[in-house]
Image (cartoon, grey):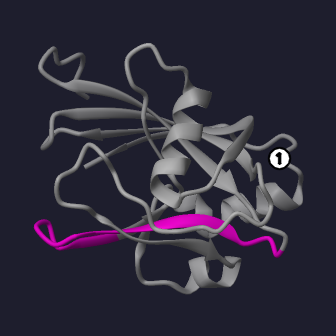
């Protein structure tokens, strides 16, 4: 196991787990043609200097999906370390709600990127997420999240561990 690497960038992220009235989960479809990768993940992104996690969450959901998020409790924490990219992410996943129930979800953009990766932003059913061949991050959104939701997140595993590439 590698220890602290001063050249590695450490990044803190906040993401929102937002369900609609049909118990469908808001997800963002990304496509990186350069890396030939496509993936789904909840809206979210890195904290900016001086910004707290909830402020970042609201900003990122607005940028990526065009809707206003009302942050709720922290549900999961997950780490991702990429030795190839020299990057260590600490991701916090908060339950969220739409501040305005009938606000229209749209595919937004990532102001930090010149070439946009966001392809679509919409609500996905449990079945869609379980049956898709597209990579989903974090992986628990295919199955464990739904079990935790059914149990009202009582006694669930908050720390999801560290994933490495």
Q: Nearer the viewer, residue 2 or 95?
A: 95
Q: How many marks?
A: 1
State the image quarter where residue 107 is shown.
bottom left
Query: Looking at the figure, which quarter contains the N terminus?
Result: top left
Q: Position of residue 124 (x, y in %)?
A: 63, 76
Left or right side of 116 for 51: right
Q: Is residue 145 visible?
A: yes
Residue range corresponding to the magenta coloring: 22-38
Above or below, comparing residue 65 to residue 124 in the picture: above
State the image quarter where residue 50 is shown.
top left
Tag 1 residue: 153
Q: Nearer the viewer, residue 32 or 65?
A: 65
Above or below, comparing residue 106 to residue 100 in the picture: below
**Residue visible at 62% across and 64% down?**
26
**Residue visible at 17% across and 60% down?**
115
State the image quarter where residue 90 is shown.
top left
Judging from the image, what secondary structure is the residue with disc 1 in?
Answer: loop
Q: Position of residue 159 (x, y in %)?
A: 60, 35
**Residue 41 shown in magenta:** no
Q: Is residue 160 visible?
A: no
**Residue visible at 17% across and 38% down?**
83
Q: Position of residue 4 (x, y in %)?
A: 23, 16
Q: Position of residue 18 (x, y in %)?
A: 70, 56
**Residue visible at 60% across and 84% down?**
128
Left or right side of 70 for 63: left
């Amino acid at each position: 196991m590698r220890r602290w690497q001063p050249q590695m960038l450490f990044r803190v992220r906040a993401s929102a787990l937002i369900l609609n009235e049909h118990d469908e989960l808001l997800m963002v479809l990304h496509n990186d043609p350069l890396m030939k990768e496509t993936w789904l993940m909840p809206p979210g992104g890195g904290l900016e200097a001086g910004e707290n996690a909830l402020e970042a969450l609201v900003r990122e959901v607005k940028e990526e999906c065009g809707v206003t998020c009302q942050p709720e409790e922290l549900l999961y924490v997950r780490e991702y370390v990429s030795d190839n990219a020299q990057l260590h992410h600490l991701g916090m996943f908060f339950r969220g709600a739409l501040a305005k129930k009938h606000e229209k979800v749209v595919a937004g953009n990532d102001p930090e990127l010149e070439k946009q990766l966001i392809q679509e932003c919409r609500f996905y059913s449990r079945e869609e997420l379980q049956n898709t061949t597209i990579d989903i991050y974090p992986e628990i959104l295919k199955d464990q999240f739904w079990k935790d939701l059914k149990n009202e997140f009582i006694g669930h595993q908050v720390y999801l561990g560290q994933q490495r590439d």
